[in-house]
Image (cartoon, grey):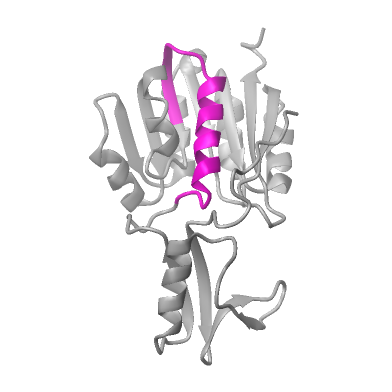
Amino acid sequence: MRPIIPSPEQYGYRNRITVHAEDGVIGFFRRDSHRLIDIERCPISRDEVNRALAELRTQHVRDGHYTLRAGFGPRIFSQTNEAIANALRDLIRQLIPLDQELLIDAYCGTGFFAKGLLEKFRRIIGLDWDRFAIDAAGESATAKENYIAGDVEVELGRALQQREPTKAVVIVDPPATGLTENIRKSIVDFAPATLIYVSCNPPTLARDLSVLQQKFRIESVTPLDMFPQTAEIEVAVHLQATSFAN
C-alpha cells in the first residue's frame, strides 16, 4: 500500500456537475433522499462551472437534469479532477517499463491513458462502448493506435484471445460496478504479464481482485484523492501475472 496522492486543490477542482431542477428549485438531492436542496454555488467546482450554474438559475428551465461543464469540449466522460487525473497517468507511466509490445486499454474513453503511454508500446488497442469517445480518440491517432467502439466485454475477450500474454499490458478503468464476470474470466484465462486496475469503488475493486489473484500478484495499491471533500476515492492497483513475476 503506497501513500495517498493528494489533490493540489481541496476546493474548486470539479470540471463538471449535474444539477436537478424541480418546481423552480435547482440544486442537488440530499443524500439518500428525493428532497432537492437549492444550490447557488458549488464550493468544490471550478469557477466556469459555477458561472454556468448562475446562468442556468436565471432561466426558466424545465424539470430535469442538467450537466454543467468547464470548457466546451466533447460531451464524453472525463475525470472530474484534472490535476489528479494527470497524476494518475504519470503513476501508470512510472509503473510500465519502456519497450513493451502491446497495450490493451479497456474503457479507454478518448485515449487518456493510451496517448500518454505512446512511447512505451509498439501497438495500442483502445476499447470503449462510447462511439463518440472512440471517434475523438481516433482523430489524433498515430499508426500504432487502434480504437474500437463496442461492447467492452466482447471486444476485450476477443483482443485477449488473439495476443501473446508475455507481450501484453492491460489497463482496465471500469465504471463503479467494476468488471463483469466474463471480463474477470477473460483476464484470468489470458493472464497478461501486467495488469493495471483503476477503480473509483473499493468494494467492487476488492471483489474483482479476489478473483484476479488466482493468476496475479498485487505489486502495489495507490489511492488518489480524486474527489476532495467527499467520501469517494480513486485507486490504482498494479498486478503482475504470477507466471511472469520474478
Q: Name the residue located 54 percent from the left edge and 21 percent from the top edge.
A: 94
Residue at figure coordinates x 55%, y 78% from the top left = 40
Q: Quadrant of the C terminus?
A: top right
Q: Position of residue 62 (x, y in %)?
A: 43, 87
- All told, the count of numbered labels is 0
Q: Relative to residue 216, is residue 50 depicted above or below? A: below
Report the residue that reaches farthest toward the bottom.
23
Compared across the picture, whether 138 is left or right of 215 comes to: left
Whether residue 121 is visible, yes or no, is no
Where is residue 55 shown, x and y percent of the image? 40, 77
Front position in the image: 164 or 132: 132
Q: Quadrant of the N terminus?
A: top right
- At a point 29% along the width and 24% down the height, the residue shown is 144
Residue 87 visible (yes or no): yes
User: Looking at the picture, how far across and down is residue 234, in whole percent?
Assistant: 63, 44
Please indicate whether residue 2 sits to the left or right of residue 133 in the image. right
* 49 part of magenta stretch: no
Q: Which residues are magenta?
A: 78-104
Q: Indicate the position of residue 158 as horizontal and vertical percent values.
A: 43, 33
